[in-house]
Amino acid sequence: MSFPLEKARDPSKLRRIAIEPVSRVEGHGKVTILLDEHDRVHQVRLHIDEFRGFERFIQGRPYWEIPVMVQRLCGICPVSHHLAASKALDLVVGARKLSATAEKVRRLMHYGQILQSHALHFYHLSSPDLLLGFDSDVAKRNVVGVLAAYPELALQGVMLRKFGQEVIRITAGKRVHGTGSIPGGVNKSVTAEERDELLRALPDVTTWAQAGVRLIAELHAKNRELYETFGTVRSNLLSLVGRDGKLDLYDGVLRARDADGRILFDGLEAEEYESVVREDVRSWSYMKFPYLAALGAEEGWYKVGPLARVQNCDSIGTPLAEAARQELLASSPGKFIHAPLAFHWARMVELLHAAEVIERLLADPDLLGRELVVTGARTGVGVGIIEAPRGTLIHHYEVDAQDLVTMCNLIVSTTHNNQAMHEAIREVARKHLDGRAPTEGLLNHIEVAIRAFDPCLSCATHALGKMPLAVDVVAATGERVARIVRDAEHAP
Amino acid sequence: MSDDARKTFALDGQEVPFEPGQTILQAALAAGHYVPHLCFHPEFRPHGSCRVCTVKVNGRTTASCTTPARDDDVVESHTEELAELRRSLIQFLFTEGNHFCPSCEQSGNCTLQAVGYELGVTTGHYNPLFPNRPLDASHPDVLLDFNRCILCELCVHASAEVDKKHVFALSGRGITKHLVVNAESGRLCDTPLAVYDKAMSVCPVGVIQRKGRGFAVPIGTRTYDRAPISGIAVARREEV
């Protein structure tokens, strides 16, 4: 099985362009494009060229270390891994229901994480493309350029992220890689002083979040054609939804819809994920290609993340975000939205939702409670699923009778979106690159489509416009015929 | 000087009184002066194994935990030369074992980590050996993570002298020296170790752990989060 533009018929006669690394995403990845002598596109692939190995070296470690160890996967969304691992190991220590305090402290931590990560992605990583233009001056197409052109907006982005980081610090102990969540609960609750500190900052946060939603809605309205068609590929959608069908990013049941919004399955518990999700492998990629088992690899690939979530749920349980969601849905009456650029809009709806959830949680006296940990009958298996900022995150562990982990399976958000990202960049390549001489601006179109999914390849680069990029055009004979270089000092 | 006169030695130019039988380290700590140290424990006979407490006495290097204090000796401790030696010793320990502080339950309560911070150790410097040391999780209540062992022998002494159980011992020589468990099977579950034993509470690093208790104490509230080890060691001088 092979998707269109996945495998060129005769690569030896084609020249290869590499976008390496892909910039303004978390981590290191590259895109390779094979072109013929008329610049027609024959093959497009996204490669994640790092290998982390966490699933292996967690084996043999005691289970209580795992939520702290596994979060080192990432510096942007460690809270998601910290909590997904904790949720899985709750089941191992027999804590099927946490104390109200532990549940709410964890939720607060998670929504703080959603808020900071979404702010980071929209304001720092993606707004340069959206505000300054996909092929604007590359020297200014970065957060510093945004700061110069839209100082107030850029500052709001920074302050939003700072607030989310403070929520994490208060609940997890540190802004990055904290230890607050442990199997069976949390190791600290929130003090009245800490709560009040957050409450004081909250009104501004909500105002800025609303401004963010307005901004992305206006950008859509100004250029509907681009925002609705750029890299658009129809696919199934997968996410957790709350047991009441509402958006819930911390806990719930799995629900999937097809591209037209028809429910494929609903109400699946975390432990049942293996019955609906399979992972395909391709010889040319370190990243697996998950798909819905019932539909097969060809038809069963899907999107996760903000755009999947806001459409998959029945509604959002906070008023401002629900109104914003309705506005987003109204932009495509009667049709499910599959445009990658709509991810940004959905992301900002979720950012606003996070601010509202944090406000509710801060008003809840349970947050200050003292019952931190519960335990029950020990088991040997745990599956924890959480909606990380980038999408559905699955942690699955087996623990032996001596308390050591014997098996670990992690399916991270970016992996779920693997095929969808590929299809999006292939669509962009067809529409924008095919038959045209590649320029830096045109190649950035590919990156814009990738960025929309907010892939977490590991940690951010290029925020200050210094990301090295060298694109070699190599003839079939192996001779380099052209080279496009940015930041020559660091280019390979 | 008459016999009943107070006996003192000079530590970095400051007069330090001592009682007969006290070592330089004991007298220094009792007088409120911190000398970096690692394997010394006030409840056990000093054995000078780690050498981190090395000082110069009248120009000659010696372990201050085993050297008796003598009247009118001139002792140097806070010199750049000794600090560099101590940093190297700490770096050797970090690189000989597998010390991953970010996910270690003992982080913040770990003496090795705290002394490292105290001495300004910022990297392992030497090539890590990455030894392969499987855990012993056979005991129902206790986990042994040999990756973190610094061969201080405190558990050996505590188990032998206080618990009277002789659960732990060191085996091998030189770079192959390692902590072993005194059971024919070599497994902790076949020893009489119990969670209330003294040997459970003396490990300065994270080798001997109670099972199931991970990260129950939040970051920022652990022993060496609150104050550097120099301050804490001096504050606890009455124990000495």
Image (cartoon, helix red, strand yellow):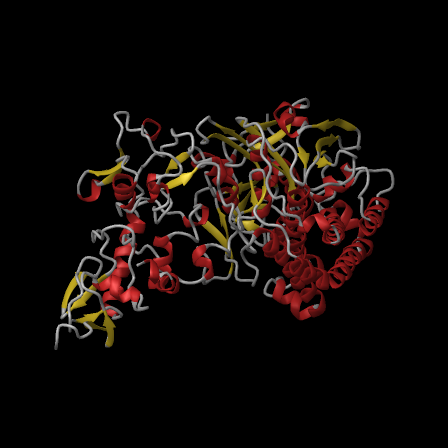
The answer to whether any part of residue B120 appears in the image is: no
Res B209 quadrant in image? top left
Residue at 59% x, 47% y: name it. Answer: A79
Residue at 61% x, 25% y: name it. Answer: A274
| Residue A298 percent coordinates (x, y) | 65, 27
Residue at 38% x, 28% y: name it. Answer: B138
| Residue A344 percent coordinates (x, y) | 72, 50
Res A45 quadrant in image? top right
Q: Quadrant of the C terminus of chain B?
A: bottom left
Horizontal side, residue A222 vs residue B117: left or right: right
Residue at 59% x, 56% y: name it. Answer: A169
Q: In front: A481, or B131?
A: B131
Horizontal side, residue A203 vs residue A410: left or right: right
| Residue A476 percent coordinates (x, y) | 47, 42
Q: Quadrant of the N terminus of chain B?
A: bottom left
Q: In front: B229, or A439?
A: B229
The image shows residue A187, relative to residue B229, as above or below, that is above
The answer to whether any part of residue A404 appears in the image is: yes
Q: In front: B131, or B232?
A: B232
